[in-house]
Image (spheres, rainbow, N blue to C red):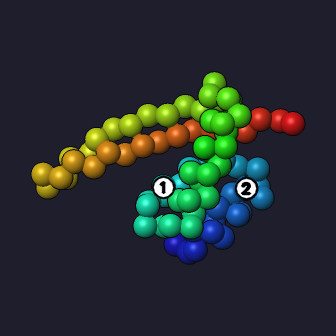
Amino acid sequence: MGCQKSIIQKIIERGGDCVIAVKVNQEKLYRQICAHFNNIFDMQHHKHVNTDCVVEVNRGRKNPVNASLLAVLDG
């Protein structure tokens, strides 16, 4: 399919929206995203963030999956 970075860049350049999955083992990206969301929370913009958590069960292992959606605000 190609490099995830280049695909995401093309979507953004063409004005599209996208969702990507980020795992903890993608340390640098994961830390940057966490810092961004923590900054939003610190600025008390909670109303602009939707979060959800589901627990996937696979081969007897329970894996919590957290999802957060941040609305892009003008200004």
Q: Which residue is mark 2?
A: 12
Furthest toward the bottom, the residue is 2
Who is closer to the viewer here, 1 or 75? Answer: 75
Give the quadrant of residue 29: bottom right
2 or 1: mark nearer the eye = 1
Which residue shows up at 27% across the image and 49% down it?
Answer: 63
Furthest toward the right, the residue is 75
Give the quadrant of residue 28: bottom right
Q: Position of residue 1 (x, y in %)?
A: 52, 72
Q: Secondary structure at mark 2?
A: helix
CB contact under 8 Å: marks 2 and 1: no
21 left or right of 59?
right
Q: Position of residue 61 (x, y in %)?
A: 18, 52
Furthest toward the top, the residue is 47
Q: Position of residue 40 (x, y in %)?
A: 67, 39
Tell me the kind of residue under disc 2: Ile
Q: How many marks?
A: 2
Which residue shows up at 61% across the image and 51% down it?
Answer: 35
Q: Position of residue 11 (x, y in %)?
A: 69, 57
Q: Which residue is mark 1?
A: 21
Q: Is residue 71 visible?
A: no
